[in-house]
Amino acid sequence: MLVRIVGVKTYTDRHGKARRYYRRKGCPTVAMDPTLEGNALAAEVARLDALYKPYAARAGTLILLIQSYKEKSAHWEGLRERTQTDYGRVFDYLRPVYDQRLIDFTAPVVAGMRDTARDDKGFKFANQLLVTLKMLFGFGVEYGHMTVNPAADISTVARPKDLPEANRPWSPEEAIELMRAPIYLAGPIAMSAYLGLREGDVLKMAKSALDDRLQVLSLTTSKTRRALELPVCDDLRSILMAFLKWRAEFWAEQQSKKPRETVQDRALTMFVNSRGQPWTGDGFRTSWGKWRDSLVESGKVAPGCTFHGGRHTVGTILADCGFEAVQVKHLLGHGSESMTEHYQRRAKRRGMLKDMTDAVQMAYRLGGENVVVLGRVENGSD
């Protein structure tokens, strides 16, 4: 007899692989061993229940400060979803010291926490820990939970010198290979390759961002809240047309399989996955990672390639073409500007932005076979 455990989900995924997850309300999702049964399964659930049990916050403790910060802080409310997730990982990491008194957090203690995080999880997480604690303790000082911010003057961890360059630019040849992906991947990749857009902005982009003639893309960046109107070059337009054609044919096929039902494309985002659904961040990163790794394994792309590298590629190409940083920022959305400046320069910038996107397009055309005529881009599939 099978007994269903509340908060534990066991199922077989579409690849036939057994999976099990611990999913209690208010707790992070934790992958579990799907082969556990009987007492072993009960013991693992009990362990996770104890690890993630709700805290009865005591006055003057770290957990109370975290709860208050999430409830009252305008800074927390203003964070992007991805950044809130980064903060959440730090809060989960701090669980063992939730009951620690705030007066026990001194500068030497915070420095020690930084060093432990560096050794356990690397320099990036250690620096994220510092950023999170500085904001958290700053809120604590502001609202009277603490008298000083013990993380305020703690130095960050330097990037190890032997690490490869982070988010290195793609070569034009690599960009072309990356855009040979199945079309549901090629579309988002092309947005990074030609316009230098960030992953989060690409995945959340609305269908309405693109004008009817597929010539102008309008969006507001999530990081800088910068409103952009970007010209779509010929090669990018061809890839977008191929994607829109694939999307329409996909849903027509779904309708043909269920002629007695109304099957509609309900996704409001510009890009969707192979099942016609809006991309999730994890889903896209998994699909992108598998495609990139296959190219690395075949020797078509060098190791160290990241999606964000496309943004660096655009910046590098434009710098090589002689564009100044004050010009490039209008394409990549760096910094901010007043509305007066925005409207005064809007018309003048259109020509400059087109020159920049044409320069990126030409770099790829000179890098090898024209990406527009690649059959796999036109007919991308699983």
Image (cartoon, grey):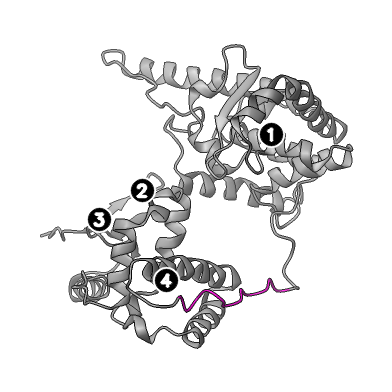
Mark 1–mark 3 CB contact (< 8 Å): no
Look at the image and tell me whether residue 289 can be seen: yes
Q: Quadrant of the N terminus?
A: bottom left
Q: Closer to the camera: disc 3 or disc 2?
A: 3
Looking at the rendered structure, the kind of residue marked 3 is Lys
Cα distance between the residues tagged 4 and 1: 38 Å
Report x, y in % for residue 162: 75, 73
Q: Nearer the viewer, residue 359 or 45?
A: 359
Q: Closer to the camera: disc 2 or disc 4?
A: 4
Q: Is residue 192 left or right of residue 83?
A: right
Q: Which residue is mark 2?
A: 13
Cα distance between the residues tagged 1 and 3: 41 Å
Q: Is residue 25 above or below residue 326?
A: below
Q: How many neighbours does mark 1 have within 10 angstroms: few (below 14), some (14-19), or many (20 or more)? A: many
Which label was assigned to residue 195? 1
Q: Earlier in the sequence, mark 2 or mark 1?
A: 2
Magenta residues, start to end: 149-160
Which label was assigned to residue 137? 4
Cα distance between the residues tagged 2 and 1: 35 Å
Q: Nearer the viewer, residue 285 or 97?
A: 97
Q: Is residue 174 above or below residue 6?
A: above
Report x, y in % for residue 284: 51, 44
Cα distance between the residues tagged 4 and 3: 37 Å
Look at the image and tell me whether residue 231 can be seen: no
Which label was assigned to residue 9? 3
Let me know if residue 150 is in the magenta part: yes
